[in-house]
Image (tube, coloured by chain):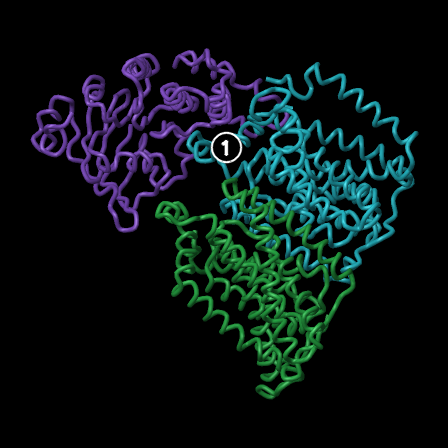
Amino acid sequence: MLRVESLQKSFDGFMAVNGADLVVEKGEIVAVIGPNGAGKTTLFKLITGHLRPEKGGIIFKGDSIAGLPPYQICRRGISLSFQVVNVFNRMTVSENVHVAVLSHIKKTSKLFLPARNHGMRKVRDILANVGLIDESDRVSGSLSHGDQKILEIAVALGNDPELLILDEPTAGMSPEETAVTIGLINRLTSEMGLTILFCEHDMELVFSIAHKIMVMQQGRSIIQAGPDEVKNNRQVQDAYLGGAD
Amino acid sequence: MDLGQTITIPALCSHLLVGLSRAMILFVVTSGMSFVLGVLRVPNVAHGSLYMIGAFSAFSISTLLGGGSTGFLVALVLAPLVVALVSLIAERSLFCHLYEREHLMLLLFTFALMLILGDLVKMVWGPDYRSIMAPELLRGSATVFGAPFPRYNLFLLIIGPLVAIGLWLFSNKTKIGKIARAAAVDREMVGAIGINVSRVFAFAFVFGCFLAGLGGALVSPMVSITIGMDHDIVMDAFLIVTIGGLGNMWGALVGSLIFGITQSFGVLLLPQFAIVFPYLAVVVILIWRPTGMLKSVW
Amino acid sequence: MSKGFFGLKSFIPVAGFLIILLILPGIIPRFYTYILTLIFVTGLLAMSLNLVVGHGGLFQFHHCAFYGVGAYAFALILTKTSLPTWVAFVAGPLMAATVGLIIGWLCVRLNKLYFGMLQIALGSLIWAVAFRWYSLTGGDDGIHGIPMPALLDSINSAYYFILILLLICLIVLYLILKSPFGLTLRAIRDNPERCETVGVNVKLHKLAAIVIATFFAGIAGTLFVVVERSVFPDLLFWVFSLEVFIMCLLGGWFTFPGPILGAAMMVSLRTFVGAYTEYWTLIVGVILILLIFFLPEGVLGYLIRKSKGLRVGSAGEG
């Protein structure tokens, strides 16, 4: 479904991504891991169009999407949930998801009918799915951090994506919240048929749910394979897993 | 619409020089605004009012001292100081309490200040317009490149670069100048190393207003001193600062040159619409380079 | 969601207020009717600005350029051509919206401050042309004594005409703000990056908002000529744009009717304080400073906050 080939991106001479390769098949859960600064977030931003690659290709469902603006990439079926919570702070939880849903059903240009006539059921379904339905009318800025991260995912789901990209979905969460999120991710794949690409620092989580793991170091992809193969790979062990958690 | 004078070399040179001398005044005023913009990150809408107070003060001081050459020179020195005092009062009493607030509030404050100062000028000097003559030495014209050229404008052509050099030396060679420049780039760092940022802001604001006053004093023999001066100059100054690069002193110079020269050539080509030319130039530049021609300090 | 403006609670006072407005011309002196009409026009202008500023987050620094274009277009067609009056009425807003489309398209690629600066530059260009083109626009003096159809000749009929148009425009604006477009616009105001990520073509939506706002500004400009029977370059000057900006802030720019309140306050100040002293500008300046220090959310924003006991949040809260 998604293929990234030899991607390159630099900032003022610093090569943030220097030869990244990635393959994501439909229905898979793929994890990208690597030390801080390895280029994981940059890679995600390249895929979703927030940054333009200098070299290399990004192919989604057979079409090249490198260099397209973010809103067009979203329309094709890729959604991103940000690492640092990036929702509409002043709006309610419900309104947050509603914006995404309205965008998806292409109703954002409707001028004269009330917003609540369009897409509210979808909003409620998503909120029920992620477990935030009780907080629908709370201003999102007042939610707990864990709930805000889940709202991040809920907003990304508003676009009915085929590929959902999660940038550190459990960062800053308590163990209980992490378990809930893992359950959610699994449900998204098994019940809703989503393909998921994520990056995390929590290795237990990664190895427990990922079908495939891609390891990055200093902007390059070292290896992409199943969890066991990755665990046993010497290079990965030296570079990353050796000694650290 | 007649096409101005015939375009001869002397006419071109004459217009070029007029444009340059106008640009010098604009530069003095705009560098002040640029300075404030760079350090406080807020455009001073009252900048024009202070320019106007500078002009009126120069008129009063010069008239008080008999209107001669010395009178004018003293006015040239004192008027900016008067303006600096006015701005200091405004800053210490009200403005400084707003530094923690969002920029919109600071902008609004400068707008309120403009309204207040405008009426204060009306109160003190009345609504009629004033004019003063240039000192003896600088009256009349000299012949430059075969065309008559006002001596006062020549004077401006000397003063302008002097101010530019002075400003450059000040920003780069004096301690306070360097601190101001640093605060423009990163005020938190400056605060973190123990410098009172509020004082730096106060200084920047007063210094910028001083330059506005100087510009007003310098322009006083060239134009009729009226109470609409503030509105006319401040937007031009703001546009110049934007095309030059926000907070960039050399940018203010470049922008002023473009503004002054395009206006002069407008007078040559299509005198009825002379003021349209600089705005046209600004539009073209902003479309081509929205962030200004030189690097902004932000 | 909508216990706001048209909820039952506020309906009765609003209806009562409307009834008062309708019978006022019969009982108050002509001068006050004229002032009220001016408030309606300026209020509409302020509302149109707030669509893009308060609800859209754009730095629309020279909104009055479009207002002036609407006014001049209307005036010029009435005085320089022999086209029927209704054409002039349509042309005013259309011209304003067209200029809004062009200027908006140029500016929308830019961010925040630069958006505002380019708009000021373009607006100043329009002002400079109007200021100097004596033969067409009357230059510095403007055009005066513009003839109106008999139906609108008296101040009372102008009052009702403008009041009705104002109400229609307000209803339309309210619907727009409550619509999906309105929600998307507010989302763009709060977090344009996120909007891009959820598939919203942010630039296009901003441009659409600008065109709508400038259309209403053009209506306001046209109505101004109906009241004043003249146009002049000051309508296009940046100082007026800033004043209208202030009206929005004065009234409360996150609320729906705030801008009209701000407009009412400014026009009243100018008229009534101006009758006592020629230094009313100074008074406005002082009031503005008081506002900055004590009421930064604007008058209406403050009142709403006091009555609800919470912070003024997302717009559309009447």
Q: Nearer the viewer, residue C187 or C215?
A: C187
Q: Residue at x 68, y 44 (%)?
A: C286
Q: How many marks?
A: 1
For the N terminus of chain B, the image quarter is bottom right
Neighbours of disc 1 within 10 Å: few (<14), some (14-19), many (20+):
many
C244 sits to left or right of A197: right
Q: Is residue B215 left or right of residue A86?
A: right
Q: Amino acid at mark 1?
A: Asp
x then y, percent, for residue C78: 82, 49
Q: Give the image location of residue C268, x and y in percent.
A: 78, 39
Q: Quadrant of residue C212?
A: top right
Chain B rendering hue: green
In the rendered image, which residue does mark 1 sit on? C190
* Subunit of label 1: C
SS of the residue under disc 1 = helix
Percent x, y of residue C13: 76, 19
The chain that appears cyan in the image is: C
Residue A140 versus residue C200 in the image, above or below: above
Q: Is residue C100 depicted above or below C142 in this figure? A: above
Q: Position of residue B70 (x, y in %)?
A: 63, 79
Q: Who's the residue at 59% across and 65% down the image?
A: B80
User: Which chain comes out purple in the rendered image?
Assistant: A
Q: Is residue C252 above or below residue A148?
A: below
- Which quadrant of the structure image shows residue B215? bottom right
Q: Left or right of A154: which side holds B131?
A: right
Vertical side of C117 occupied by B77: above or below: below
Q: Is residue C99 visible?
A: no
